[in-house]
Amino acid sequence: MKAVVLAAGLGIRMRPLTFTKPKFLLPVAGKPALDHVVSLMKNVGINKIAMVVGFGKEQIMKRYGNGSRFGVKIEYLHQRELLGTANALSLAEGFASDEHFVVMNGDTLVDQESLNAFMQRYRELGSRKDFGGLMATIEVDEPEQFGIVFLKGERVSEIVEKPKRTKSRLANAGIYLFDPAIFNAIKRTKKSKRGEYDLTASMQVLINSGKAIYTSPLKLWADIGRPWDLLVANEYFLRGQRGEIHGKVEVGASVEDNVYVGEGSRIRSGSYILGPTYIGRDCDIGPNCFIRPCTSIGDDVRIGNAVEVKNSIVMDHTNIGHLSYAGDSVIGSNCNLGAGTTIANLRLDEKEIKMEVGGKVVSSGRRKLGTIIADNVKTGINCSINVGVKIGPNSAISPGAIVYEDVPPGTMIFVKPVIEKRVWKHSGSLHE
């Protein structure tokens, strides 16, 4: 069977991380999110994949090539104008018009068990004469944030994007299996108010023509649409990893179960590392640092003396200086956090933390969330970063600064203290 992976979006809601790389290449449990998608496809027997690419296509094509390194065959389709998901899929008509095929968003991650069940559901339904497609669904708490699926019996009757009021909590999870008839439906699809051709609108055309679309529920689903979604996916995939030590662990360091340490990495004496944790290649960790569960550290990362990192993603070639703390955060590549940098991850009132996403301030739904730091950021010694703050790429924070607001790309935040000199009457002798 073939699959089409949609990986062309700008990832505006994932900024500032996506100013320098496509969201599909952001790391989850030690490797890009798109690696997990390819692996999921391969594990259900799919060996031919068409990737629809756009922003960052050079980076994607460089990593995946023809797919041989991943055990699949990959070809690329360039969506030159971002005219929606239906338009993206239409590019694959020549690739997938001869058989049923899978479609998956490149920023959607699920558990392998659920995808296996999805394929089994297809084997049960795919031979029906009226079969038009199958879609994965997930129960959500905030239906107004998603495309919501309505059923009539076991068939989909309607898909409504972000309804304001609804009793249904069944959301579209962005994984489909279509009959080639979907391509004719796409040709009959009208533009949305946003000026795009939506795949869900094409599915409605297919339904209205008499074809049936069925559903298959997922157990775990992570749509990497907002920065903190990376932490959700990271935790899940870390818990499924195997602990292996390929680097050097010095005497006096404690590495607990379910910790992966890559080749060339060194865990210095006094370090205490709890699993699940992933540490990449050629890292220098410690001494005397504390790496807490659900932390993913990239390649060539330096974690200094007495540093604590908890439930965070730290990307390649980043340095976190001694006496620093990072919790529930995403830290980009080529960053340098000066000694004593402290990242807050809990409000004083312990309410849910809000963050600006796509031009709107929204609740993350999380009590604990630190900062999102893009690539090539430097912080001076003893600076503090408040909860929910985002720092754009190529920026710098001066020593002693307290950052309460988002920092745009290419910006330096400089705090100059007011110094006042007074006469000091000291009772003792200067020569004591």
Image (cartoon, rainbow, N blue to C red):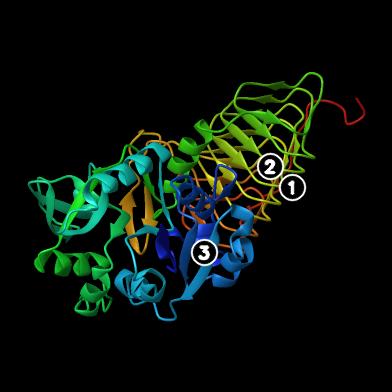
Residue denoted by label 3:
22
Q: Residue at x 51, y 71 (%)?
A: 76
Q: Amino acid at mark 3?
A: Pro
Which quadrant of the figure has residue 181? bottom left
Whichever of labels 2 and 1 marks the residue nearer the N terminus, that label is: 2
Give the quarter of the figure containing the N terminus.
bottom left
Query: Which numbered dot is residue 280?
Result: 2
Tag 2 near tag 1, CB within 8 Å: yes
User: Is residue 329 shown left or right of residue 128?
Assistant: right
As drawn, which residue projects farthest toward the right? Answer: 431
Residue denoted by label 1:
300
- Count of numbered circles in the view: 3
Q: Is residue 338 above or below residue 5?
A: above
Secondary structure beneath label 3 = loop
Whichever of labels 3 and 1 marks the residue nearer the N terminus, that label is: 3
Query: Percent position (x, y) of residue 23?
Result: 49, 60
Q: Amino acid at mark 1?
A: Asp
